Image: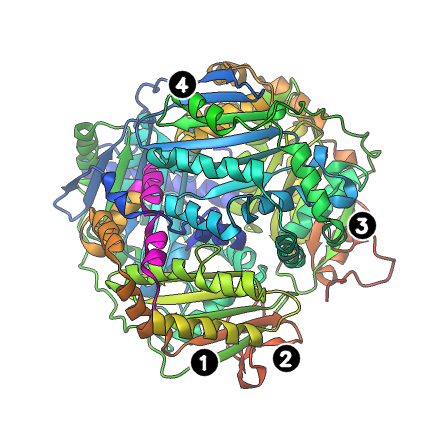
Amino acid sequence: MKRHNPTLALGAIVVLVLSSVASLAQQTLDRTKVPPPGPSPVLRVPTWTKTQLSDGAMLIVSERHNLPLISFTITFLGGANQFEPEAKRGVASLTTSMLTEGTTTRTGDQLSDALQLLGTNLSANIGAEEGSFGFVSTTKNFEPTLDLVEDMMLNSTFPADALERLRGRTLVNLTQAKDQPTVVGAQVFAKVLYGSAHPYGQRATEASIKAITRDDIVAFQKAYFQPGRAIITVVGDTTAATAKAVIEKGLHAWARAGDKPSFDYPKLPELQPAKIYLVDKPGAAQSVFNIGLPGPPRNTPDFFAIQVMNTILGGQFQSRLNANLREQKGYSYGANSGFGFGKGPGAFRAGGSIVSAKTDAALIEFMKELKGIEGDRPVTDEELQTAKDNLIQGLPARFASVTAISASITNLAVQNLPDDYYQNYAKNISAVTKDDLLRVAKKYIDLNHLAIVIVGDRSLVEGPLKATNIAPIMILDVDGNPVAAGASGATNR
Amino acid sequence: MTSKRSSLSLVALLLTVLFLQPAYGQNASATAIKIPFETFKLPNGLTFILSVDKTTPTVTVDVWYHVGSKNEIAGRTGFAHLFEHVMFTGSGHVPYGLHDKLTEGVGGNNNGSTTNDRTNYFENIPSNYLESTLWMEADRMGFLLDTLDLAKINAQRDVVKNERRQSYDNQPYGRVIEIFAAAMFPKGHPYSWPVIGSMTDLSAASEEDVKAFFRLYYAPNNSTIAIVGDFDPAQAKAWITKYFGDLPQGKPVERPNVAPAKLDGNKRLVYEDRVQVPRLYIQWPSVGTKNDDDTALSVMSSILTGSRTARLTKALVYDSQLASQVFAFQNGSEDVGQFQLIVVPRPEHTLTEIEDAVDQVLRKFISEGPTAEEVQRAKAGLELGFLRGLESNLGKADQLLDGAVFHGDPGFFSTDYQKTLAVSAADVKRVAAQYLAGNRIVLSVVPKGKKDQASKATDSEVVSMLLSGPQGGR
């Protein structure tokens, strides 16, 4: 057992004694014997076809006929980071909301009622580096739903009064987000790591939302929703030929335009020596931790080694961070870690919500585990095997529904990964060695330059954090701006 | 619902509500609504539901025990959920950690959840790990107490207290659930406390409490297990008999006698929270899922807030723009239910204005009822929602088990579906008058020190009388 807790080691002895008693009582069945697994099921990766539509968009179709369902998604390469000016952050998401507000032939109410009668919910979202617009429908309602989607994408009228309503709602959401310690933690963490000049450190603010005009929305729509950067993914109860014919017909008015965006990001701000950034939340029951620094992009050759390393450190329930901070110490409901793989330097982040009284003790344990994965506590054979099995044998779940299949296939196109990526996944994960794990842990978790962002009750946690001597403390407000020495950090009362 | 591993944030909850909003037409029955299944019962009273679907080489084992927070006694609230955590600490022949290794560690996952009415445990695993999963579930059903000690209980007690802090105390508006539970039901009523329980009660649970609870409720005769996915039923039955067959039957379980939710008068409450945006919450006593009105109430929630043209949404969010968001839903438990409304105001408008506007819409709705078209639209999404549910082994397992445990029929989903399709405008008009015109609880959640922001503040009672600060219990 990999446990270090003496109490639990004693428990293990009790297990052995009791289990032998139980097996005596049961003669025929030896319950101590772990039933071995059956032969591994063959991995069935869905197949798909790729074609270019006449407007330049790429069409991917994967057939699946077990249920009368079809998933349809248009994905656009590039997102808010590529298409939003800094002063107009939030224009992408306002534009997607505006698509449902009316077209040249339908009012917002008519669109809503028509969709509801078809039983379909649209999802539209523009994220940091890609955007998508799509739905899942029954087979028989695919064409009428697609007709509505095309109408919204090509013929939206963007009524000015709708913009004011959506702006009001967005401002309320921004205010509510400031009361959410986990949201504040994530936002301040991004600002500390990347600074305001880097798109990764920017987000919609009250000022940027207030600055957006209807002209901005119209301009964004024109610039963004272009077939030249679109990937249309159809998965489910249809055929490649039918899907192509239906989509070509529906999108015939979509003029060939738009290039794939470049993902060049400005230089990162210089790394700072490790520091604790404390955001005061008077009365908070827990301290929300985000510890990390900018990491590698998705296309790093170290991707598979990082996946395995992070699975051991904080990627699953039985990972080191959760086993220690939750299961052994009871400081938290859960602790974890991850890499924000994107086109740019997505963050490595470890964190969790920690009971206020154990904020200092938890920081010591976080640091111990980070040092551990960098060599203080070598990875065992069992840890390595379990992590690899978790990743490799978890593949079928990526193909368990039409939306899961769509996301898995689309991701290959978005990230420029080969079509046989999933077939070779097991081979690539299996090839990772313990030396690889140590190398990537040391390379990407730079302990001397960690940003330690903690959102909690300053009056309770500042003294104990200082006493750990792990790093100097800087007080920030909920927007991530420094608070003058001696001033209260509370800015949101 | 409260879970072992992950919690739904409010945002996720709201998204779920939105996603579940029904939408599509009467020709829905064109697609057969069915989940093929067979049942298999052992002499010790343990029932299995088997449903084969070989689409994906995975299988789900979903174990329901018919015990939840309503089976707790006063002074030991939160116990059923604390126990759920204890069930993951190892059992007679399964050392701590092996459960995760044989699920998550082989590419699957596991979790448990507790509601007022039941507790479940599930594993989603590659299909070749079915036998070891059944072995582990049988072991904690039959041999949990062999290795249980106070150290294990205390470790999970700390985790659960942190779950409470994370999901309730440190969440804006996170204490609304327990405020309503205490206000809706008389003291001592089985639904009058929240599933997560109070800090004081969580501290009070003794080792003997845990053991007695297990002996009473975690017996084969109080459990139903679904196996759904890629497996061979004959082989599964052999393993079931092998691992569960000799577990002893427990004593018959006494179900609590639950009085329906009933308010003798209207209640107006105000709670000060660490928030900047106030919210208005209204709840009416309604019915549980065993009552036929449950389906009409669900359809009504969609007509009120399920789409842009829904009554309350259109009036509050689009026309008058008093509110930024409004959600209504029927929350039916096994024995009782509440019809709930949440309104997030726009900054320039008061909760009093909002409550008056809600009442104006509801008065008209109660007197006129919905149009046939509104009812049709509200039901239009049923078929798609059902079909999407069929894509997940766990989703199917939960549907079958909900029917088996609460309605005595694993195939109840089909009855429920037909009942919902049959809901008419007259049905909705009747339930609107019967439930929405009755007594209710209005809760204003306001920023600290801003009691005057409550709806009709001078008539509202301050809730801090009922509950102490975020670190303490009641």
Q: Is residue A178 above or below residue A366?
A: below
Disc 2 residue crowd, few under 14, some 14–19, many 20+, Cα 10 Å: few
Tags 3 and 4 on a common chain: yes
Q: Residue B112 location in percent, x, y?
A: 39, 47
Extreme left residue here? B43
Disc 4 secondary structure class: helix
Q: Relative to B97, is B143 on the left or the right?
A: left
Q: Residue B393 location in percent, x, y?
A: 32, 37
Extreme bottom residue here? B458
Label 4 marks a residue whose chain is A
Question: Which mark is first along the chain, 2 or 1?
Answer: 1
Find the distance from the CA under tag 1 to the CA under tag 2. 17 Å
Q: Which disc, if any, is residue B112? A: none
Q: Relative to A342, is B59 on the left or the right?
A: left
Tags 1 and 2 on a common chain: yes
At x 15%, y 47%, the residue is B44
> Is residue B391 magenta-colored?
yes
Q: Which residue is mark 2?
A: B452
> Is residue A213 magenta-colored?
no
The colour scheme applied to this rendered structure is rainbow
Give the quadrant of the C terminus of chain A: bottom right
Q: Are marks 1 and 2 in contact (CB under 8 Å)?
A: no
Find the distance from the CA under tag 4 to the CA under tag 2. 64 Å
Find the distance from the CA under tag 3 to the CA under tag 4. 62 Å
Q: Relative to A341, is B360 on the left or the right?
A: left
Label 2 marks a residue whose chain is B
Label 3 marks a residue whose chain is A
Marks 4 and 2: which is nearer the front?
4
Q: Which residue is mark 3?
A: A473
Q: Which residue is mark 4?
A: A241
The kind of residue on which mark 2 rests is Asp
